[in-house]
Amino acid sequence: MPFLKSVLNSALYLDPADQSPAACERRKKELRDFDGMRFLAEIGIEKSKDAAYPDKNVVVRAITRDMPQCGGRPPVEQIGPTGRPTGETPGAPPPSAPLPVPVHKPKSAS
């Protein structure tokens, strides 16, 4: 399975075997949508080839809900650029447009 598809399956808590139209539609993302996406991952250590640089952590693979490593964990809550939950949860309809923020006239403008 391609890495980005497994990231989507993990982040959106989709079953990798689910090829329903609804699941396929939720997997349609642009590259910029991956910015800040939260998902379960297996982390490994890549040994440095040069002694001047330390070893580094690398993502080995995304953990999807069909893997035993998932251990029945609930979906990972997605956080948007504002630091608030995006509402992107399994089975949830796409989030609606946010309500406009009311504008108040400052007292000094009276």
Image: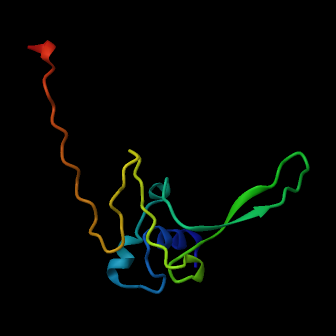
Q: Which residue is painted at 41% across and 47% down in the image? A: 83
Locate the C terminus and report the quarter of the image it occupies.
top left
Q: Where is residue 107 shown, x and y percent of the image?
A: 13, 17
Q: Where is residue 64 shown, x and y percent of the image?
A: 53, 76
Q: Where is residue 54 shown, x and y percent of the image?
A: 83, 50
Q: How is the image coloured?
A: rainbow
In the rendered structure, the answer to whether residue 57 lies left or right of residue 100 reads right
Locate the N terminus and report the quarter of the image it occupies.
bottom right
In the rendered structure, the answer to whether residue 54 lies left or right of residue 69 reads right
Q: Nearer the viewer, residue 73 or 47?
A: 73
How many numbered tags mark residues here? 0
Q: Which residue is painted at 49% across and 74% down in the image? A: 73
On screen, residue 63 above or below 94: below
- Residue 48 occupies quadrant: bottom right
In the rendered structure, the answer to whether residue 32 lies left or right of residue 86 reads right
In the rendered structure, the answer to whether residue 109 lies left or right of residue 52 reads left
Q: Which residue is painted at 52% across and 83% down in the image? A: 66
